[in-house]
Structures are given as C-alpha cells and as structure tokens.
Image (cartoon, rainbow, N blue to C red):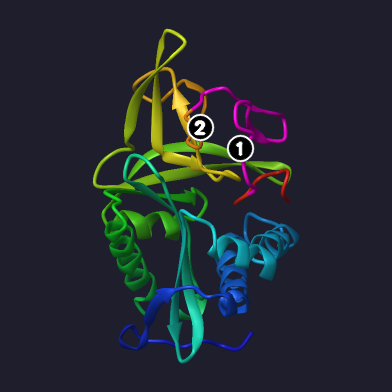
Amino acid sequence: MGQREADSDGIEIREAESGDGEGIRDVALESLRASYADVLDEEVIETAVENWYADEAMDAELEEEGMLYLVAVAGGEVVGFSQNLLSEEGGTGTILWLHVDPDNRDKNVGTTLLNQTMANLSERGVDRIAAEVLAENERGCTFYEANGFEKADEREREIGDETFVENVYTHEGSAKFETREFEDQTLYVNWAESNRGSKAPFYAAYSDEDGEELYGYFCSNCESFDTAMDSMERLECNDCGNQKKPVRWDASYL
C-alpha cells in the first residue's frame, strides 16, 4: 500500500461505492494494526479484514438497507471510512467503525469524517448516535470523548482466545431505552446496542431500567422477543428466522 497524504482542505467525504473496496481494506488493515498490534495477533487482524471487507461482502453491505458507509478521499485515494448502522426505530445510529489511515491521523481527517458522518446520520432522522471502541484503544476512546461523546456502557468481547472490554459511547446523553411489554413483564429495549441481522437489526433487551440485567434480544423485523443465542453467539429469531450477521469480533466469524 502506498503512503496516503491529505490535509483537511483536500478531503472529500462521500458515500462509498463498489470500487472503493480495495481502499477500504487497506485503510482498515493499517488502522487496526496501528491501534491493536500490541493486543491482537497479526493473523486475527488480517483474517478480520479479509472477511469483513472482501469484494462480495462489501457489495452486499453497500446495498443493505440501514447500512451507511462513508469514505474520506484525498488525491483520489481512500484515507478513511466510517461504517454505520441505522435503526428503524428510536432514531439511533451506531458507528460500528471509523478508520483513518495512520499517515493521516494528525491531519484532522478523523474529525472531518466524524462530523460528516454525524451530519449524514442526522439527515436520516438519527437523533442519538452510539460508537463502539475496544477499551484497549485509548486513542480511539479519547477521540470520541473529545468530540462530545460520553461513555454509556461497556461489555466483554471474545476475540480469539482472549476477552476484551468494549466501550459504548453515545452522543449527547446515555443510551436510549424504550419500554416494551412481553409475557406480563416490562422489558427495556436499548436502541444504542444493536446487532446486524439478515432481515433487520437485533437490539439488546433488559429486564431492568438501568440496563444491567440482560434479558435477551429484540428482533426489529417482527418485533419479537422470542430469540435464541447459542454458545458461538449465533442469534436467531424463532418467529421470523431473522439471523444475526457476523460482524466485528464474532468468534464464529473469525
């Protein structure tokens, strides 16, 4: 991969196209190496990038409803991108990844990309934005905090043979919950904690209003709480067959 150079005045932010796949893979690989080389094996990083951003996978995601990819382009090359998931309910969007090529991390590319990402999400009706970052990525956590995000939650992620903590940040307040009734009990759906599904996203559902006791998952395709997850974190709705799509650090995907 050749060195990419940019300044904030020369950055174009636009929606990703099918021809951006190679640039997105290059940026993701170098960004993950720069952020996690001290804690993740090179094989894990390479496998993740190959699976997540293969041409066929990228083409499918670019056509997927509720998925928004934005790329930062300078000198005709991709120097950064954001991958975002929009919820159909609750006006919440989740920044799954925001990657910037390491050569451009001190050139305001990340802030420019984040601001445009937030503006695009706002135009699509989003009024609450969540972002997910492994706690080991101190620079990434600081980046969101410096841009007005607040830590709302943390959870464990199994990556390879190790367990890591992932921080969940939200913009302008804590994660948004909605009260739902199910089988004579009150559940609290967290619209900021989503998992991609084959038909529509799944959202974490809690049995307490503080979001500490996880009940299960809410299928937004058929609005059912009748879902099941196996030991490999494969999630499926028993009513409509909606299935969790592998993303990020899923053990069953790596």
Q: Considering only order in the chain, which callout, 2 or 1, is on the residue closer to the N terminus?
A: 2
Query: To which quarter of the image does residue 19 belong?
Result: bottom right
Question: Can you see residue 106?
Answer: no
- Numbered badge on residue 139: none
Identify whether 218 is placed above or below 104: above
197 or 231: which is nearer to us? 197
Quadrant for residue 51, please give it.
bottom right
Distance in Å between CA atoms under marks 1 and 2? 9 Å
Residue type at mark 1: give it: Asn
**Residue range (magenta):** 224-246
- Identify which residue is drawn at 35% across, 56% down: 144
- Per the image, label 2 sits on a secondary structure element best described as loop
From the image, give the main secondary structure of the stretch colored magenta: loop
Residue depicted at x 73% and y 60% = 47
Q: Residues within 10 Å of mark 2 (few under 14, many from 20)?
A: some
Residue 142 image position (x, y, % from top left): 37, 57
Q: Is residue 226 left or right of residue 205?
A: right
Question: Is 94 included in the stretch rendered in magenta?
Answer: no
Amino acid type of the residue tagged 2 in the rendering: Cys
Mark 2 sits on what residue? 222
Would residue 243 be counted in the magenta stretch? yes
* SS at mark 1 in the image: loop
166 w.r.t. 106: above or below:
above
* Viewport quadrant of the N terminus: bottom right
Q: In the rendered structure, are the residues bearing label 1 and label 2 in contact, judged by CB atoms less than 8 Å apart? A: yes
Q: Position of residue 138 (x, y in %)?
A: 45, 55
Which of the pair 70/171 is nearer the observer? Answer: 70
Q: Residue furthest top?
A: 184
Q: Residue at x 57, y 43 (%)?
A: 197
Q: Label 1, on which residue?
A: 242
Q: Position of residue 246 (x, y in %)?
A: 65, 48
Lateral position of residue 14 relative to residue 196, left or right:
left
